[in-house]
Amino acid sequence: MTIAETPARLEGKYKALVVCWVLGLGNLVSWNSMVTMLDYYDKLFEKYHPTRSLTLVYLTFALGAIAILAYNESRVDTRPRNLTGYTIFFASSLALILLDLATSGKGGIGPFLGVCAFVACFGVADALVQGGMVGDLSFMRPELMQSFLAGLAASGALTSALRLITVAAFEKYHNGLRNGVMLFLAICTFFEFLCILLYAFLFPKLPIVKYFRSKAALEGSKTVSADLAAAGIQAKIENEAIQQQRLSIKQLLFQNIDYALDLFLIYVLTLSIFPGFLFENTGHHHRLGDTWYPLVLIAAYQVWELISRYIPLVKCLKLESRKCLMIATLARFLLVPTFYFTAKYADQGWMIMLTSFLGITNGYLTVCVLTAAPKGYKGPEQNALGNILVLCALSGVFAGVALDWLWLIGNQSF
């Protein structure tokens, strides 16, 4: 099989960009639906601190799963991995609807444990899909990676918008909050089903995707064989010795330790504030009310994070220097005291502006790091590096969620 460097390899690029965007949206739409519905679960399971405990459950399973998958990435075929992940997302989203219907929207330890179980499934699915997709797109064009990452952010913006609409539509009705949540979950379940169809039948058949996967197969990758078979291509590895020549996970990590630290620190800072602090510690200096205020803050974060993920498309605005990326990442930690004093003394306008800035810096730096990470490796090594970077990002998310509990020190409700 000969792979030529011709313009034909770019055929289907724009279709691939759209599909990657939708697949990115599907990767986090279920979890972001949980984040934006925490006002409902906070009232249903108030004494269990769902804004923090559900996030901790999600991240525990996501981190454990991605650690196992990153270590064994070369032996896990991408197609069954991603399809399994999207199927779990779909089934768990549907199960949350059925659980609420079965319990008639009542609280208690039983329903709460049921919600925790399905949130844990979301964590495992996230590890399967995000690691699989980032690893797969790492040996393709940066535009595809950027589109997938933009889709991740779009899931947050979309769920926030839908949540605000459903709250406004059902606010005056009996059980309006619960009815809005049911409609909301049904929409998210549909998106997950759409992602299953797109990945199973369209994505592997796009010419640009077939080109890069065929190229990766020639370089020794064994993770693309099922997708190539689905596209009607017989994968062939010309030289088995290539597998022996590839860098180890440890070598890849040490060569890219600054990128790994960047992603870890970006998400440590973000998740130590979002969403727990925004729901429970933003004070009373506002006029939007306890129902609308956290939803507006979450929406501000999600919308600006989505916008910021497109900023690196403007070449002069893209940050590529490894030193500058580290400086910018460390400088974000000044947001911790800023959020503390804003919540204590400032009004809602300052908090909304600060939350928007948190979203802008999170989205912008994430895209810059993942698209600037070295591209000189062969297909199998790029896939491994993508999984390593996702592991570092989820490790940062887990650490940030754990640190988020520190905001409750001195709080009488703790």
Image (spheres, rainbow, N blue to C red):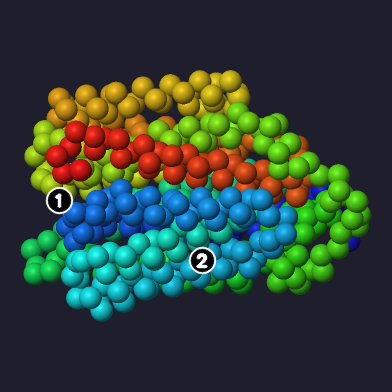
Of residue 121 and residue 209, the one placed in the foreground of this image is 121
- Residue at position x 28%, y 64% from top? 112
In which quadrant is the C terminus drawn? top left
Q: CA distance from mark 2 to mark 1?
A: 31 Å
Q: Hey, what amino acid is under mark 2? A: Tyr
Indicate the position of residue 70 as horizontal and vertical percent values: 63, 50
Q: Is residue 246 above or below residue 40?
A: above
**Which residue is depicted at the point 33% across and 54% down?**
54
The quarter of the picture where the N terminus appears is bottom right
Using the image, tell me which numbered label, if any, was put on residue 86. 2
Residue 342 appearing in the image: yes
Q: Badge 2 local density, few (<14 within 10 Å), some, or many (20+)?
A: many
For residue 270, side relative to residue 67 (left or right): left
At x 43% / y 21%, what residue is drawn? 331
> Which residue is depicted at the point 73% across and 55% down?
74
Question: Which quadrant holds residue 218?
Answer: bottom right
Q: Which residue is mark 1?
A: 291
Left-right relation of 185 to 377: left
Q: Could one spot residue 163 in this view of the protein?
A: no
Q: Is residue 67 left or right of residue 332?
A: right
Residue 294, percent from left and from top: 21, 45
Please report whichever mark, 2 or 1, sits nearer to the chain's N-terminal start. 2
Residue type (three-letter) at the residue carrying disc 1 = Thr
Q: Which mark is residue 388?
A: none
Residue 272 is situated, as x and y percent measured from the top left of the image, at 36, 37
Q: Up-down: is 80 above or below 399?
A: below
